Image (spheres, rainbow, N blue to C red):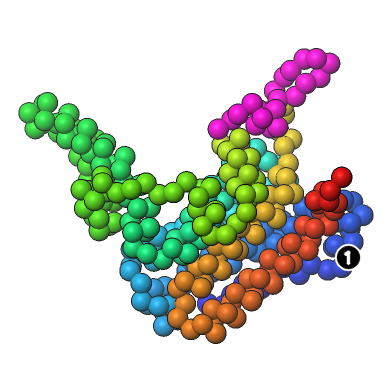
Amino acid sequence: MEIPLPPEISKTDLNKCRETGDYCPVLFEWYKYVSQIANFYASIQLDSLAIKKISKIHHSVLIGLLNRCARLMFSNVALSHEGLFGETTSIIDRSIFESAIKLSWLCHKGDEDSFNRLIAEGLKTEVQFKKKIVSNIALRKGKQMAIEKRMLNSIENYIQKSEISEEKIVSSKKIPDLASMIEVIGHDRLAYIVGQKIGSHHVHGTWVSLWFHYLEEEDGIIHPRGHDVQTHVNQYAYIPLIVLDAIKAYINYVFIDEDDAKGMSILIDAISKEIQDIYQEVVGSDNEIV
């Protein structure tokens, strides 16, 4: 298995972006490439000689989060290849952002408690649901419906795979919120505002989101917006950069040889720089004091 090759972006391609002011075609290719890089690293098995000895459960959490980033990015590539479905890609990008931050946080912390807390948080509702189902069965004097049997088997399967007891799941502390995770891994407050707060508008359908994606006003009359919402150029840059940070954190956490990790990190940094350089042309003077 070889690492994917980067997209071939010519000077002609970049000049066309500069002429039109539309950098989406080029950044789209980098977005797609980062999804392939995420998939590549998620596919490295635990028995690889390059990977240090870590818990199978911990490794499964890391590659699961990394694969989630990759798969959701693949989905956005399919949705936005003609520029549309911006209202949907923004929701998916918010999910990618959260997974990437959690992955970076786990790699930064690297302790069993953090992994267990993340796993347990996803199982608390399952344990509560199990308790409710068992209670309902008891009211029927042990008579069990087929759907209840399937649900209990499914819940038990997830709990067993976690290797955490129900008692520990229930008593486990909550994981920190995203803002706290972002602070721990060294990102600034802007990362939280852009990724969490703005992204949450699109997930929850706030007033801001309704006007951004779903409503239009013409001659004082408000009506539903048509199917013309493009994926914003910021998404093609910001999300790959966050995912690349997570990949780099993963590399530095799981690979044994420091020189190998350093070499791979240099590659990730080079990809980030390519995206940042292009994006800087997009934002232009937006970051300057006025």
Question: Is residue 59 in view?
Answer: yes
Position of residue 6 measured from the top left corner of the image (x, y, whole percent): 69, 70
In the current view of this chain or complex, which residue is farthest to the left?
A: 141
Question: Is residue 63 in view?
Answer: no
Count residues near mark 1 (Cα–Cα under 10 Å), then give few for <14, some for 14-19, many for 20+: few
Query: Along the line of sight, which residue is nearer the eye, 287 or 164?
Result: 287
Quarter of the figure with residue 23: bottom right
Question: What residue is at 68 percent from the left and 66 percent from the top?
Answer: 272
Question: What residue is at 7 percent from the left and 28 percent from the top?
Answer: 141
In the current view of this chain or complex, which residue is farthest to the right?
A: 19
Question: What residue is at 25 percent from the left and 58 percent from the top?
Answer: 163
In the current view of this chain or complex, which residue is farthest to the top?
A: 220
Q: Which residues are magenta?
A: 204-224
Work out whether 1 lies above or below 122: below
Is 218 inside the magenta-drawn segment?
Answer: yes
Q: Is residue 157 left or right of residue 215?
A: left
Position of residue 36 measured from the top left corner of the image (x, y, whole percent): 59, 64
Q: Secondary structure at mark 1?
A: helix
Q: Is residue 256 left or right of residue 56?
A: right
Q: Is residue 264 left or right of residue 225?
A: left
Number of numbered callouts drawn? 1
Query: Along the line of sight, which residue is nearer the eye, 193 or 203?
Result: 193
Residue identified by numbered label 1: 12
Q: Which quadrant holds the C terminus?
A: top right
